[in-house]
Structure formats: C-alpha cells, structure tokens
Amino acid sequence: MTPWRILIADDEPKIRAGLRAQIERMGLPAVVCGEAEDGEIALELAETLRPDIVLVDINMPFMNGLDFIKALNRTRPGMRVIVITGYEKFEYARAALDMNVLAYLLKPIDLDELRRVLRAAMDSLEAERAHNRHFEWAISQINARRSFLREEFLRDAVAGRLEADEIRDFGVYFDFPRSGALRLMLISVRGVASGDKPWSHILRQYTLQDALEADLPAGLGFHCLFTDDRGDIAMLYEAPDGADETVRAAVRDALRSELGVQARVEVEPVEDVTALADAYDAAMERLTDRAALSPVVDAAKAYIAEHYADSRLELTEVARSLSIHPVYLSRLMKQELGMPFARYLTHVRIGRAVELMNDPDRKIWQVAEQVGYNGANYFSAAFKKVLGVSPAEYRTERKQS
C-alpha cells in the first residue's frame, strides 16, 4: 500500500525536524513528503506534492495558518488538516474547526495524542478512498449496462410506468435528442413466424439492430431498439420529415432477408420524450386495428364498446360475460392490445368524450357522466393523462383553431 503523504508547515525548524523524526518513529504507513517555513511556501508545496495530511502552525510569516487553511480548502479540499500551535485562544480554535480542521493540538505536543489523531486521519482517508473505489466501480457497472438500462427505461416509459419527471431526468442521462424529430416505431411479427421460442423476440431485435447498423437508412440518426411488454420490437429514432418511409422499408427488408419474417410497422411522432406512452398507445391502436385479434379479445372489445358508459364496469364483469377467468382475459388484452384492461377502457371513454365535446352545448360534467365517470374531477384527470390537456383546455384550443 502506498504510504500516506504528510506536509509539515511551521516557521520553527526545530519543530519541523522534531515532528518529522517522531512521525518516522511511530511506524505508521506514512511519509513526510515536505516541509514549509511559511504559509505561502506551504500552499505551493500542497499544489505540487499533493499531500494527504497537513500539519500546520497558526503563527507563520507572509500567510498565517488560518489563511493557509482557507486557501487550501479552495484548492485541495480533500486533505486532512491538523493544527499544531502554541495559541490557546478560543477564537483561533473555533475558526479552525469552522474550516473543517480535523484536530487542534497545543504545543508542546503529546506524542500519543498526535499518533491517535494521525491514525484517525489515515482511517478517514482510507474510508474515503474505499468509498470512491466503490463509487467508481458502480459507475463503471452502470456504464457497462447502459444499453440494457436504456431498453428497460424505454419499456417502462411506453408502458406508462414512469412519471413525467422521471422520464425527463432519465432522458437527459441517456442523451435522448431534443430536436423534435423523434419517432416511435412499432414492429409486430407476432403470429407470422412459426415455432416462436420465448427468446425469439430478442433474436429479432438484435438481428434487426445489426442489420440497421450495417446499412443505416438515409436520414436515420439516433436510434434505440427495445422490446415492449408484448415481445414486439419498438424503436425510438430521430429522422427528418419524409424519412419515415425509408426507415420503415429498411426495417421490413432487414427482417425479411435476415429472418424470413414479414412485419407490420406503425410510426408515431414523439413531440416530447415525456409523451412516449401516448405515442406508443396511438401506434399500438393502429397496429391492433390491422391485426387479427383472438375471438376472446374481440368479444371483450365489443362488450366494452357497449358498456363503457357504466361507471361500475370492471374487468371481472367483462370476463364473466365471456365465461373466462379475469386473469386470463387481462393477460390476453395486454398481449394483443398492448395495454391492460383499465388503460384500454380509459382510452375508449376519452375517445368517445372527444366526440361528444364537439357539441358546444354539452357541459363537461354531462360528457363525464355519459362516458362513465362519476364526477368531473375524475374525468378531467383521465382526459389530461391521455391527451395532455384538460377538457376545458381542449375545448378552448378547438375554438381557437
């Protein structure tokens, strides 16, 4: 282990020599790396020698000990400072402690006390070094898993499991562009390839990723592929207007040539990274409309379309009407619609509410009741979560347009 480095700053040569000799005899894992007879020289040596521990006197020429410590805290804040002085004045001791001095020792020095204080300084330095090593290791592990964490983040974001502030903060960490040209692409091959294994979606994702990296479509800048909760591939990417068809064709061609599968693709603009779930829902709705749903999910959609205005409508009621278990229905809806029952019901209700609000004579509370909400407050919260604005704001914007 590299010994800790100690700098001695005292205007008396005998004191400096005595401290050096005593420290060398203590057998501590430390070495005196330098001596200074005034504060200015001590500050220069602190910059060049980079000691871990500084023993400093208060009364020194040109720059006294307290001014030296103040300057040292600005330039080398991690050093451990021990004051050794003949000044017993309370104001000096208080000033030193206010500057995070580790100890304030009076001359003549008690060698046992000096040894104890030096040992405490080294222990605290070792603890700090260990903490820094652990922190650096943690950062390296995070950076090594950055791609995986980014995919997990995007999966949670499109599923609506993250708040806007969380998405915004992680978006900064993952360096998502803020150009306003972000797109979300959903790529569905479910049911096309035969004999799908549990890991098939991973194979498709990385095959597509490699293909795109090998031959980037024109206009494709930032791009990140991930899988959603259904196991379908999604891609967040940056492209200028007019480049979507090029990217879409490149994705289809890559999957067909590399894996022999046909893909259904939907693209939705992402106005802001916090609106990922909305973009996903919009793309998924179009993708779902084009896909062949199972008879169970198709019947569930029909039942919801007929009964959405009932504020008491729940998953158990829909499942009972179809004579199946609620858990099974919930799983099927999430797999095939890309969203759980409650979220799908909310989208149906808000979609119908938008239609009803085109009638300017219809009050917002009346619309709320007609689409299954007991009270305008619950309706307003659901409306804003789906569309990003309150019902009143939506109406105002429509009047102005």
Image (tube, helix red, strand yellow):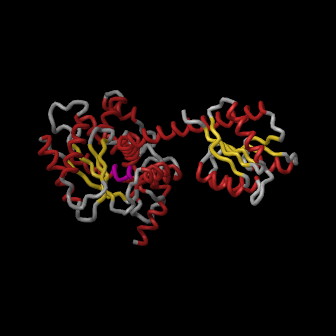
Point out residue 271 in the picture as x, y percentages from the top left corner: 38, 60
Q: Is residue 117 visible?
A: yes
Identify whether 177 is placed above or below 296.
Answer: below
- Residue at 83% x, 41% y is 107
Closer to us: 125 or 387: 125
Task: Give the mark count.
Answer: 0
The magenta stretch is 276-281
In percent of width and height, residue 362 lies at 45, 61
Relative depth, front residue between 212 and 48: 48
Q: Position of residue 359 (x, y in %)?
A: 40, 63
Within the magenta stretch, is there residue 280? yes
Residue nearer the viewer, 218 or 313: 218
Drawn side of residue 63 relative to residue 290, left or right: right
Our reading of the magenta stretch's main secondary structure is: helix
Picture residue at 72% right of the left edge, 55% below the top: 39
Q: Quadrant of the C terminus?
A: bottom left
Q: Quadrant of residue 302?
A: top left
- Left or right of 236? Residue 91 is right
Does residue 258 show up magenta in the picture? no
